Image (cartoon, rainbow, N blue to C red):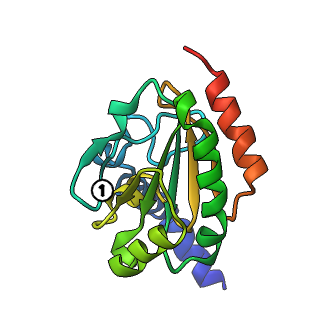
Amino acid sequence: MKALSNIFGKHRNWFFILLLVIGLVWIFASRVSSDNLVMGAIPQPFEGFPAPDIELATADGNIIKLSDLRGQPIILNFWASWCPPCRAEMPAIQAVYQVYQNDGLMILAVNASNQDDMNDANAFITGLNLTFPIFFDRTGHAQDAYKVSALPTTFFIDRDGIIQSVVIGGPIAEALLNVKAQALLEDQP
């Protein structure tokens, strides 16, 4: 034990310098690069921060950019046809859409197409008589931008493009959707 103490004592400064260098390398290697930042702000979308600007495509190839909808409140829902909570909450989302669409509320449903079958997704849409805009994330880019880790995940985005609320998982009750939709609509410019 005394021999170990002598060795450590003689090389203590080098040991601490080595630890410092390892720590600095770790900090540098694990930093978030500016390429991973969302709109230059944050690496993950949180309440109170700007919503990531994504491009979404419909089944027939029409493209919409989220930033083009600035000025309108948005409920952005990520779902898949194989997801039971997604299926359970879709009728509530459809009901809220029917109530508030004329007030300017946008509901954008994004199918996680990179992990879903397109035939199943289309049967899901038809079977539930969904009339709000449905988009298909075939590459997973939108899910990556929003750091979606569970389906369904729903983002409530105000007119200024700021995320007001995030609900991970589901199903979301129609009453909660109504409250959140009304809050987004009451925030007038």
Write down the quadrant of residue 14 in the picture: bottom left
Q: Is residue 4 above or below residue 55?
A: below
Q: Residue furthest right?
A: 175
- Residue 159 lies, in percent from the top left, at 51, 26
Report the amino acid beneath label 1: Thr
Write down the quadrant of residue 172 in the picture: bottom right
The reply to whether residue 33 is in sight is yes
2 or 55, nearer to the observer: 55
Residue at figure coordinates x 69%, y 47% from the top left: 177
Residue at figure coordinates x 64%, y 46% from the top left: 96
- Residue 46 lies, in percent from the top left, at 57, 43
Density class for disc 1 (Cα within 10 Å; few <14, some 14-19, many ≥20) is some
- Residue 116 lies, in percent from the top left, at 40, 78
Residue under numbered circle 1: 58
The reply to whether residue 17 is in sight is no
109 or 126, nearer to the observer: 126
Quadrant location, the C terminus = top right
Quadrant location, the N terminus = bottom right
Q: Is residue 100 above or below residue 160?
A: below
